[in-house]
Amino acid sequence: MDSLREFDKPIFKYKQTGILRKNIAGIVDAILVFMLANLVSYLILNEEHLNQYFNLINVGIYFFIILVVYRMTTILIFTATIGMRLLRTKYMKENNIQLTVKEKLLASFMIYVDEIKIFNLK
C-alpha cells in the first residue's frame, strides 16, 4: 500500500497566474491590436476607399474584428497571445492539460471560460 502513496497528491508542473499578470498581458495585447489595426488600414486599404469603409462599418466593429482574428490565430497556433508569451503564461485546463482545438476557439472568443485557466510557464 505504501507504493501507491505517490498517487495521493497530484503534482502539477505549472501554477495558476495572478490577476496582475493577466491584466498586463491584456494591455500588451490591446496595444498590439491597435497597432495591427492601424497598420492594416494604412497598408491594405486605399486612402480613397478608407473614408467610405469607415462610413459603412463602425470603427469599433473594425477593431473588434481585428481583435478576434488576432486572438484566434495566436491562440490556435501558439496556445497563447503575444502578450501572454511575453509574460510567460499559457492557456491550459485545470490539471495542466493542453487544450483541444474546440477549447482554443472558445478561449479566443470568451476570455474567461470556466475550465480554461491561465498558468505561469517556468
Image (cartoon, grey):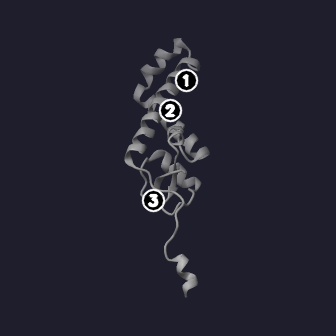
Report the residue marked by disc 3: 115
For the question of whether residue 76 can be seen, the reply is: yes
Report the residue marked by disc 2: 66
For marks 2 and 3, give the CA distance: 26 Å
The kind of secondary structure element at disc 2 is: helix
Tell me what residue is drawn at x 55 percent, y 76 percent: 6
| Amino acid type, callout 3 | Glu
Placement of 31 over or under 113, stated as above or below: above
- Residue 112: image tag: none
Report the residue marked by disc 1: 40
How packed mark 2 is, by other alpha carbons closer than 10 Å (few <14, some 14-19, many 20 or more), is: some
Tell me what residue is drawn at x 50 percent, y 45 percent: 108
Q: Residue furthest top?
A: 48
- Rendered image quadrant of residue 46: top right
How packed mark 3 is, by other alpha carbons closer than 10 Å (few <14, some 14-19, many 20 or more), is: few
| Amino acid type, callout 2 | Ile
| Amino acid type, callout 1 | Val
Placement of 17 over or under 82, stated as above or below: below
For marks 1 and 2, give the CA distance: 9 Å
Residue 54 percent across, percent down from the top left: 44, 21
Say which quadrant the N terminus sits in: bottom right
Tell me what residue is drawn at x 56 percent, y 82 percent: 4
For the question of whether residue 58 can be seen, the reply is: no
Labels 3, 1: front one: 3
Q: Is residue 119 left or right of residue 101?
A: left
How packed mark 1 is, by other alpha carbons closer than 10 Å (few <14, some 14-19, many 20 or more), is: few
The kind of secondary structure element at disc 1 is: helix
Q: Which sits earlier in the primary sequence, circle 1 or circle 2?
A: 1
Mark 3 touches mark 1? (CB < 8 Å): no
Residue 65 percent across, percent down from the top left: 48, 34
Residue 56 percent across, percent down from the top left: 44, 23
